[in-house]
Amino acid sequence: MNRSTAVGLAGLACAVLTLSAVTPAAASTDAGRPKLGDVQQALAALAKSPEVVAAIGELYVDGKRVGEGSAGTRLIGGKGGKIPDGSRFRVGSQTKQMTGTVVLQLVEEGKLALDDKLSDLLPETAEKDLVERADEITLQQLIQHTSGIPNWFTPELVSIFDFTTYYPPIELVKKARTVSRDQEPGEKFAYSNTNYMLLGLIIEKTTKNTVAAEFKRRIFAPLDMDRSYLPTKFPDSIKGPHGHGYFPGKDGKPRDIDRFNMSYGYAAGGVISTAHDISAFQRAFAQGKLLPAELQEVLMGGPPRGPEPQPGESRPPRLCDGDPAMSPLTGSAPGFNAVTYSSRDGRTQLAISTTLAVSNNDPALRPLYDKAAEAILCPEK
């Protein structure tokens, strides 16, 4: 597998917080909020970049959509027509925030405890030697990526172009066991999708339900996220019209990766949603409707996370002269980047999805998102 493929695998394995753009044409918002730029215009400019196949997005203020846009085409090369407004897209590692929320709700209910040991929660991890030092690793360390469990999502262990092999979550956990760990449990932050595969299995063992069912019961249904789901039947994919993402093959040419292997997602990155629905989730989370403050801090806070911002972290972005009022959460994997950008008070959300013609870790992408976001969030800068 070539280097470009390795970079793509890092997309889900290290889905960093990214500044992103999407917003509407709005003269001004209420309560003294600043003027906002035109979402369609910003997305059109974004989609003209050769790295981007298409971009869709919406802006919400106090739960009301105040702008939307769709630019580019469903398929590469100007083919396939426009992506319809409201289309579904993969949210990638934004799923982890949902998984963490469900786990911490179980903590609040007394069904789990933050200091529970992995070997007690999933005895097979110790009995079958699936996870090294499972008797020392705690639930909180899994949530905060400080367990030291290696990541299974690497080019040495899986191929992003394998669309036909189904891997049960425990099989991917087993793959991580073949990689040497390089830290003590709780020592430092080290992003690993294996942590959230294990958290998904813990949810299922504790509730006797699938992760998909718990997402629906605890998050999707209460928040009217009617178009969101976690795929459960291989090779389940995005339902309805949507944009196709691409990733460079061995020859360097963009290869359609719309059939991205759903077993790589699960509780670590599998949710498929819409701009409306993911905005509803971030609004409810920011306003404390899903977790009490002390448990929300477990998910969003925790120990220092190193030089790269990580999923769930609320480090202030460099936007609008450093205004920290908005905080982005990004999910990324080969073929796409998806960002929800939410104000700290939960009143305002921007949601954007881009399908790509390049690696999702291409360094040219971040400046494009920054430019679009500033055009919308601070047009008078």
Image (cartoon, rainbow, N blue to C red):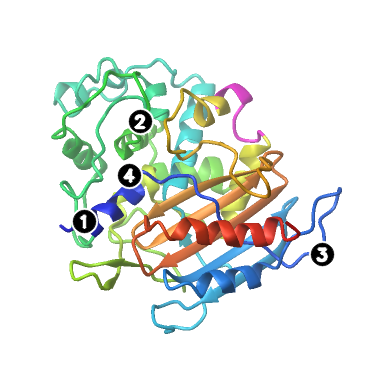
**Coordinates of residue 86 in the picture (x, y in percent):** 58, 67
Q: How many marks?
A: 4
Residue 13, which numbered label?
4
Of pointers 3 and 2, the one earlier in the residue sequence:
3
Along the line of sight, which residue is nearer the eye, 257 or 78?
Answer: 78
Looking at numbered disc 1 in the image, what kind of residue is underneath it? Arg
Asked whether disc 4 touches disc 2, contact meaning CB atoms under 8 Å apart, the reply is no
* Magenta stretch secondary structure, dominant: loop
**Residue pointed to by mark 3:** 27
Element on which disc 2 rests: helix
**Coordinates of residue 81 in the picture (x, y in percent):** 48, 83
Q: CA distance from mark 1 to mark 3?
A: 46 Å
Element on which disc 1 rests: helix
Asked whether disc 4 touches disc 3, contact meaning CB atoms under 8 Å apart, the reply is no
Label 2: how many Cα within 10 Å (few below 14, some 14–19, many 20+): some
Q: CA distance from mark 3 to mark 2?
A: 47 Å
From the image, state whether disc 1 or disc 3 is nearer to you: 1
Of pointers 1 and 3, the one earlier in the residue sequence:
1
Q: Which residue is at a point 43% across and 60% down the rendered structure image?
A: 364
**Coordinates of residue 26 in the picture (x, y in percent):** 77, 64
Image-based side of 258 in relation to 318, left or right = left
**Residue pointed to by mark 1:** 3
Of pointers 1 and 2, the one earlier in the residue sequence:
1
Looking at numbered disc 2 in the image, what kind of residue is underneath it? Ile
Element on which disc 3 rests: loop
From the image, state whether disc 1 or disc 2 is nearer to you: 1
Residue extent of the magenta highlight = 288-295
Q: Which residue is at a point 32% across and 35% down the rendered structure image?
A: 201
Q: CA distance from mark 4 to mark 3?
A: 40 Å
**Residue pointed to by mark 2:** 202
Along the line of sight, which residue is nearer the eye, 106 or 246?
Answer: 246
